[in-house]
Image (spheres, helix red, strand yellow):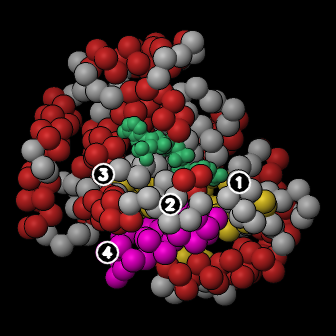
Amino acid sequence: MSVDNLSRRSFLAQSAAAAAGIAWVSATIAAEPPDPASNPKLPAAAAGTLSIGGDLRVNRLGFGAMRITGEGIWGEPRDAKEAIAVLKRAVALGTNFIDTADAYGPYVSERLIQQALYPYPQGLLIATKGGQTRPSAGEWVPDGHPQHLREACEASLKRLKLERIGLYQLHRPDPQVPYEDSVGELAKLQKEGKIQHIGVSNVDPAQLAKAQALVKVASVQNRFNVADRGSDPVLAICVREHIAFLPWAPLAQGAQGHATSDRRIAALQAIAQERRIDPSQASLAWLLARSPVILPIPGTSRVDHLEQNVAAAAIRLTPDEMKRIG
Ligand SMILES: NC(=O)c1ccc[n+]([C@@H]2O[C@H](COP(=O)([O-])OP(=O)(O)OC[C@H]3O[C@@H](n4cnc5c(N)ncnc54)[C@H](OP(=O)(O)O)[C@@H]3O)[C@@H](O)[C@H]2O)c1
């Protein structure tokens, strides 16, 4: 075991609390209003904080709200009560960065966030995205036309009941539209006060450079996890330029708990076993240790998985364990 004593105690307390119906955490919440930004005692705060765009400070373990929709990220969730409970529980545990997109459902994830959490607690940053459309259940079609992005942003503002979106991300470059045109429209929306900070997603270094030439990029959201390091060059830029890096699929979409021939996942699983933690928690701890600009956004439709994931905020991998994973 190499979790430092304080973190280990806090982690064990959280695990015990989870097993006992969360009395420990509920007691903390009951005593104070849910202001996750300023309550360092809540579990998600154990990950430390990160400033988005230089002025929005959030805990460094977020929540990805894509999985609270229906099968295939299409339509209503199978269990709407559980979806609402996941969102409320995330905030109660100190999560104050929630990632979503108009394309999740479509519209369902944003609507449920508003339904579960509005009026929003102080310090909660809802980061949404536009630029991806869903003509049918199996389709994800980028639309980076300026007019579409404007309409998408305005619709997200209404759906989320916000006057301004704290972080608005361009979901994916549209090969049919010059990237500068798409980013340029977000710059206009920012000037109009509809967006506070601009993020990009699914970019390569050249696309990131194009965006940076036009706007201050506050965050990059790319696929990244123990088994998928394809975005290492983009992460290196984020580290150098102090841009928040939001790895999507931080748990390799659930695959990290299964049998594997990948040497790095096998090492991660061995470490998880030694520490008696879940491989999902080890995956998140690896991301947190990988760089201070990383803010993982694990997604789940279940309260028990959420609690397990947030508890990873207190787990510290050692340099030796990081070396073993590679
Ligand atoms: N920018 C983009 O293009 C893009 C693309 C994809 C995702 N995203 C964002 O990134 C977030 C995360 O990505 P993701 O949801 O695809 O992948 P992920 O977080 O790596 O994995 C989510 C999957 O893992 C399972 N899971 C979660 N916690 C678990 C636990 N403790 N134990 C076992 N299984 C667990 C979930 O199932 P259960 O529901 O059963 O827990 C779900 O199937 C999304 O919510 C979304 O906000 C962005």
First in sequence, mark 3 or 2: give its number: 2
Mark whose residue sits in front, 4 or 3: 3
Query: Whole-Å distance between the Cαs marked 4 and 3?
Result: 20 Å
Give the magenta-colored segment's residue range: 99-126
Alpha-carbon neighbours of circle 2 within 10 Å: few (<14), some, or many (≥20)?
many
Q: Nearer the viewer, residue 225 or 89?
A: 89
Q: Residue at x 48, y 85 (%)?
A: 161
Upstream in sequence: badge 1 or badge 2: 2
Please tell me how crowded label 3 is: few (under 14), some (14-19), or many (20+) other residues with Cα within 10 Å: some
Is tag 4's residue or tag 2's residue first in the polypeptide sequence?
2
Give the residue type that dot 1 points to.
Answer: Gly
The residue wearing badge 3 is 303
- C-alpha distance separating marks 3 and 1: 26 Å
Q: Secondary structure at mark 4?
A: loop
Could you say where residue 49 lies in the image, as x and y percent from the top left?
A: 37, 52
| Number of the front mark, 1 or 4 | 1
User: Element type at marker 2?
Assistant: loop
